[in-house]
Amino acid sequence: MPASAATEEDVMAKAVSHPIFSRLYPRIAAFADAHGSIEHRQEMLAGVRGRVVEIGAGTGSNFRHYPPEVTQVVAVEPEPRLRALAEKAATEAPVPVEVLAGLAEELPLEDDGFDVAVCSLVLCTIADVPGALAEARRVLKSGGELRFYEHVRSERPGFRRVQKVLAPLWRLPGGGCPVAAATSPATPNTPSRRRASPSRTSAASTS
């Protein structure tokens, strides 16, 4: 394992615990799936193939949507309660899934080992987003893809005001998520395939 990759001991020493969020999130995810989230997940994962690292897997909501061309998913999740749910979801996935403890900013993975990196509704909870994206780039092969699905600040003034009111109240139960932030790893060179407020799905290549 390269020196830049975190060891299992490092990960456990820096374990992330969000007891309120981890109990609320399964219900939130189920509600979102019933109101359009599944379509966003399916769009994000369309055409994915080869070896995939999923950063911040949560409860494993994406696992059942991976296409058969995927040979393996290595799912990294730091929150122990959510990770346990992801491990259960992995047993029912249509492709092989391995769930690991780990931090987005210090992935316990080898360099240049993956064809695709997936981030799904997680970047908003990461303090060091540039660091997490640098780690995604490190573990991706040359020409690999970043696929992401993130919420964004609403373009509708009324809904945007609601987001601003909820933001300080949601931060603790939301695992640190600033709900009114314009979360996105997009750059001028990142082609956006679809935008739907308050969510964004997109793909970017490391080449």
Image (cartoon, helix red, strand yellow):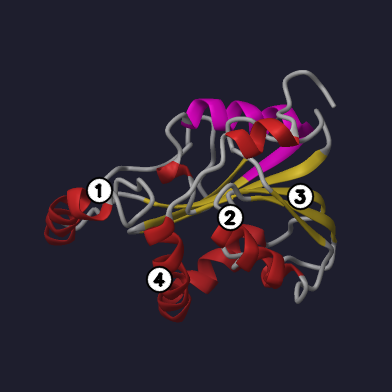
Between the residue at mark 2 and the residue at mark 4, the CA separation in whole angstroms equals 18 Å
Residue closest to the eye, 187 or 23: 23
Label 3, label 1: how many angstroms apart (C-alpha)? 30 Å
Tell me: 20 left or right of 142: left
Q: Is residue 205 visible?
A: no
Instruction: From the viewer's perspective, tell me whether residue 106 is left or right of residue 141.
Output: left
Labels 4 and 3 touching (C-beta < 8 A) = no
Judged from the image, the secondary structure of the residue bearing numbered disc 3 is strand
**Residue drawn 76% across and 49% down?**
52
> Is tag 4's residue or tag 3's residue first in the polypeptide sequence?
4
Amino acid tagged 4: Ile
Which SS class for mark 2?
A: helix
The circle drawn on residue 180 is 1
Sequence order check: which comes first, mark 3 or mark 1? 3
Crowding near the residue tagged with mark 2, few <14, some 14–19, many ≥20 C-alpha atoms within 10 Å: some
Check the picture and name the quadrant holding the C terminus: top right
Identify whether 67 is placed above or below 150.
below
Q: What residue is shown with label 2?
A: 80
- Up-down relation of residue 61 to residue 167 (above or below): below
Quadrant placement of the N terminus = top right
The residue located at (65%, 36%) in the rendering is: 11
Q: Earlier in the sequence, mark 3 or mark 2?
A: 3
Judge depth for marks 2 and 1 and give the one in front. 2
Q: Which residues are magenta?
A: 129-146
- Residue type at mark 2? Pro
Q: Tell which tag, 3 or 2, sits nearer the viewer.
A: 2
Which numbered dot is residue 28?
4
State how far apart marks 4 and 1 are (Cα). 17 Å
Give the residue type that dot 1 points to. Answer: Ala
How far is the residue under mark 3 from the one under mark 2? 21 Å
Q: Which mark is residue 52?
A: 3
Please report whichever mark, 4 or 1, sits nearer to the chain's N-terminal start.
4
